[in-house]
Image (cartoon, rainbow, N blue to C red):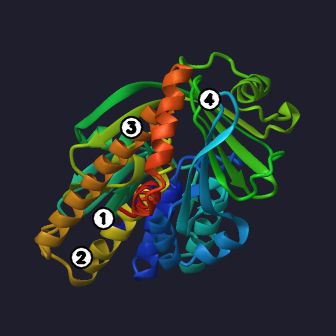
Amino acid sequence: MEHDAVVVGGGPAGLCFAVLLAQAGLDVRVLEARTERTRHSRAIGIHPPGLRVLDRAGVAGALFEQGVRIREGVARSRASGRTREVARLCFDPPVLAVPQWAVEDALEARLAELAPGALRQGVRAVRAERKEDGAVVRCEGGARIGGRWLVAADGARSALRASLGVPVYGTSLKDAYLMGDFTDATEDGPRAVLHLEPGGIVESFPLPAGVRRWVLHLDAPAVDPSARDLARIVEERTGSRLDPATCTMLSAFTVTERLAARMRLGRVLLAGDAAHEVSPIGGQGMTLGWLDAEAFAPLVAAEVRVGSGGRPGSTWPELWGAAERERLGAARLAARQARLNMALGRGLPAGLMAARNAAFSALYRVPWLGERTAARFTMQS
């Protein structure tokens, strides 16, 4: 085998996994199909558990300098006829808002420090073959790259997972969303704001450089949407005015959940969206991938250092089993939380919405309930 570990996928999960393995002294190779990274913001929320892993990877400090620290979330509604505050939550530690490309840049730079030349871009992996002493990745063009361990972090439609025949349990949900980044003309600063409206939820989150992300729930998937469409709906529901000319990213999406039946087959690991795809509502996907890396990278490094007589996972079978169960359980919990978030964001008749919001307002006056909810939203419980 040419390398101690081959990581397929140079996104947030794959790069973080590679950095942790390189820090442990392993010879790592990362294969990434793209030749250039998109500069669209995409995923933006880093929850405290994710920041813990990024700190271990040596990049949290740089990201804190670039990002916005969200310490407070506010829920508002106009369902009763005028804008009222429904609830307020405090996040301690904060959630960090930073574009995904900035996270990838930081991890890529860190990997280049630890293992120059480890990242190979423009290499598309098409299948994986398990071997007794590791695994081989077959790539477009005929290249074959082998490693004692293989990490498949190649996304929700993972070609490697499919080639290995790992069953995936998934479902498509009825929820549809429209999302865009605009110059922030609100007075909300670093707050996250949820507008609980009869037409459906409108969420807004701060981003660096005076930008704010807006996400709104739709009754049906948007067809050929525009920034003007998003701005119109936001104003109708919340009264906030957006300038369509300042839109830097626009995305319409529906929601699919996928969970692999297992995350380890011998010396092959599934990580990130290749193992578990959850709704982006709640922003848990990136952090789940980093927690996969935190759980499995030390075990891979230890197996490489001590060897296991060709029997992968035989050195500490209880630890491997516990890690896999914990990660799959965490993915199920994240999926349940995301489904709850989506259910709360669906539209209701104005009277029912006002009554529900009044009940929420009363409940969240109880301090411990607010603390527990904040912990759940930030993946700390």
Residue tagged 4: 80
Q: Is residue 58 left or right of residue 181?
A: left
Tell me which residue sits at (36%, 52%) in the image: 137
Q: Nearer the viewer, mark 1 or mark 3?
A: 3
* Label 1, label 4: how far apart the Cα atoms are: 58 Å
Residue tagged 3: 339
Give whichever of 286, 206 is nearer the camera: 206
Residue tagged 2: 303
Q: Is residue 323 left or right of residue 280?
A: left
Q: Earlier in the sequence, mark 1 or mark 3?
A: 1
Q: Secondary structure at mark 2?
A: helix
For residue 149, the mark is: 1
Residue type pointed to by label 4: Ser
User: Pointer 4: residues within 10 angstroms few (<14), some, or many (20+)?
Assistant: some
Tell me which residue sits at (58%, 49%) in the image: 43
Residue type pointed to by label 1: Trp
Instruction: Report x, y in % for residue 187.
Output: 80, 51
User: Pointer 3: residues within 10 angstroms few (<14), some, or many (20+)?
Assistant: many
